[in-house]
Amino acid sequence: MPVGYSARCRVCNSAYRAEIEKWCKEEGLSPRAASARLLEQYKEKISHKSIWQHMTEHFDVRAEAREQYQRSKEQMQQLVEKRLSDIEMLDDIAYGSFELNRAARAWLRELVQDRNKKIPKALVDLISTTAAEVRQHLKAKQELLGEDPANDIADALRTLWGDDDVDDKAKAAPD
């Protein structure tokens, strides 16, 4: 059962509920020690049995952790599915641009082989535009997948030079 409340629970109705829970969970005090400390510091008497019962019934950290983990897992799954749908959409768009580029290049080849036909500027522009779009979509896909080539180069250089050398050179450089 998750963190709860009961009108009959002495700890739930105590002004020092948060303190008692903190003592038991964070400081690791036993219910007896928490009861004694409560009486000593705040002059409030709550039996160790009441504290123990409260901690097991109304302060079930494991159940709350399970619930939060499940919610976190569901949120993660939703984000992963969204990222995958974005990647699939980029794949579809890139494939369409690639097919259009392929068809335009085939048409250009036919026109070049005929030699007597003039090549339209719009066809040349279409080929260069679709090629640029394919490159752009593939780059966006790499970024969504976390495969950024610039970061790979930076990581390789950092490994090659060593992190300590870079830090030392940065400190030694005059301002």
Image (cartoon, helix red, strand yellow):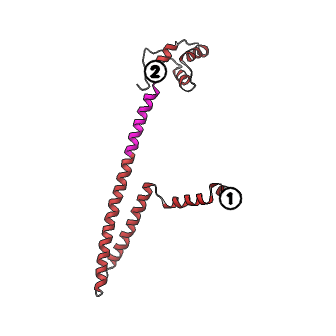
Q: Amino acid at mark 1?
A: Lys
| Residue at the spot of label 2 | 56
Tell me the residue at 35%/63% (across/down).
94
Q: Is there any visible trace of residue 22 in the rendered image?
A: yes
Q: Which quadrant holds the C terminus? A: bottom right
Tell me the residue at 33%/71% (across/down).
101
Q: Nearer the viewer, residue 8 or 37?
A: 37
* Residue found farthest to the bottom: 116
Say whether residue 70 is magenta: yes
- Residue 125, percent across and down? 36, 74
Q: Which quadrant holds the N terminus? A: top left
Looking at the rendering, which quadrant does residue 8 occupy?
top left
Q: Is there any visible trace of residue 12 in the rendered image?
A: no
Instruction: Note whether 36 is above or below 61 in the view shown.
Output: above
Report the label total.
2
Looking at the rendering, which quadrant does residue 162 occupy?
bottom right
Distance between mark 2 and mark 1 Cα atoms: 57 Å
Q: Amino acid at mark 2?
A: Thr
User: What's the magenta region?
Assistant: 57-78
- Please tell me whether mark 2 sits on a helix, a strand or a loop: helix
- Please tell me whether mark 1 sits on a helix, a strand or a loop: helix
Question: Looking at the rendered structure, which numbered label has been put on residue 169?
Answer: 1
**Category of crowding for the residue at label 2, using alpha-carbon neighbours closer than 10 angstroms: few (below 14), some (14–19), many (at least 20):** few
Q: Are marks 2 and 1 in contact (CB under 8 Å)?
A: no
Instruction: Note whether 9 is above or below 126 in the view shown.
Output: above
Looking at the rendering, which quadrant does residue 154 occupy?
bottom right
**Category of crowding for the residue at label 1, using alpha-carbon neighbours closer than 10 angstroms: few (below 14), some (14–19), many (at least 20):** few
- Residue 92, percent across and down? 32, 60
- Residue 130, percent across and down? 35, 69
The overriding secondary structure of the stretch rendered in magenta is helix
- Residue 160, percent across and down? 60, 60
